[in-house]
Amino acid sequence: MYIADFHIHSKYSRATSKNMDIEHCTTWAKHKGISMLGTGDITHPLWFAEMRKKLKQSDREGIYTFDGVDFILTGEVNNIFPKDNQVRKIHNIVFFSSFEGAEKFNKELEKFTELLIDGRPILQIDARTLVKMVRDADPEGFVIPAHIWTPHFSLFGSNSGFDRIEDCFEEETDSIFALETGLSSDPPMNWMISALDKFALVSNSDSHSPQKIGREANVFSAPFSFKELKDILKKNDKTRFLFTIEYFPEEGKYHYDGHRLCKIRFSPEESIKNKLICPVCGKKVTVGVLHRVMSLADRKSPDEAKNRIGFKRLVPLDQIIASVYQKEVESSFTQNLYLQTISKLGPEMKILLEVPEQVLFSNLPRELATGIKLVREEKLIVIPGYDGEFGTVKINPLLSENQVQQTLF
């Protein structure tokens, strides 16, 4: 397996760990079993300079390496622009095939914003103009709309104002061939909308700390060059793009509707019953991803979608440990057991996806092996996230199988 996480951030983005540097990210990519990382924040001058100094060209065009981990030049930008008497806020991921192309793009961006302020710059240009700017700077470069269902700052979020991709990208729609689904949705949810069938669906961590790398990712059959990746995504090639690694979407922090300040969590049905109003404060609730997907769905079942790339839902290993032993993820107990486990059995993704069950039980504490087994079988409880609060995963290895609630879409 060749696993890629295209969307992360650096220490130069707001609300990120100071450890989001190339050394820590590379170390954690190896812990996780991630083969490739997006650089993230390639528009930030200091990060750009560091990447250019430390990354080495690989034997594949447009792919770089550092200490055994591959990198591809990416960054996230925040497009804020008026359209049809409404302010639109859309996050997009930009991909470049060379430092020269990225540098040319950055020089053009300097006309619109101060790039040193944030690794994810705010651009007062519309989405179609962004696509043209990327192409002008690097003819092989491309754009993928980020976390497309998030209520704020996304293509289809409940506050975006867009119901169709054509309304956002207009004549540049044909230049978009992939969409990032985000933590609060998974492929079956996206398959409910037939207009998305022509796009490759990618999943990335959007990580703000090294430990979160790979919480969502993309699994390919083999390494690729930049042009080959572009071809894989354009063709939605199932022989080379094998599957995506997904959060349970309920765990995402915008899956359900709700109002965080008032601790109100609503299913879409409950929101509709309450006319989208918080019963505590009387304000409108934040309409979440599941509700938004349901409002645009034109299929009765995701099984109606054809030629789709597969997926596997996982819970990160440190979260499994924390849930099984009722500890905090950041606790020394959880982190020590995590490192002991990967030291014994190999990288996290191998443990979660490939290590045979009997090997798990012969090498790990029984309760941890049982917890991994329950996640593989999707037998766990997830209390849905809402309005910026992540969902809560509960994995209890002491419960018998008929007592474990299976999480379903």
Image (tube, rainbow, N blue to C red):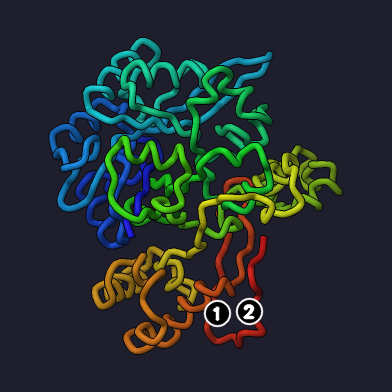
The structure residue drawn at horizontal position 27% and vertical position 75%, both measured from the top left corner, is 340
Residue 327 place in picture, x, y as percent: 45, 72
Residue bearing the label numbered 1: 396
Q: Quick check: 54 left or right of 219?
A: left
Q: Nearer the viewer, mark 1 or mark 2?
A: 2
The structure residue drawn at horizontal position 31% and vertical position 26%, both measured from the top left corner, is 43
The residue under label 2 is which amino acid type?
Val
* Tag 1 and tag 2, C-beta contact below 8 Å: yes
Q: Is residue 387 above or below residue 43?
A: below
Residue bearing the label numbered 2: 404
**Dividing the picture into quarters, in which one does residue 281 lie?**
top right
User: CA–CA distance between discs 1 and 2?
Assistant: 8 Å
Label 1 Cα crowd, 10 Å radius (few <14 / some 14-19 / many 20+): many
The structure residue drawn at horizontal position 38% and vertical position 72%, both measured from the top left corner, is 354
Q: Is residue 217 visible?
A: no
Residue 369 place in picture, x, y as percent: 42, 82
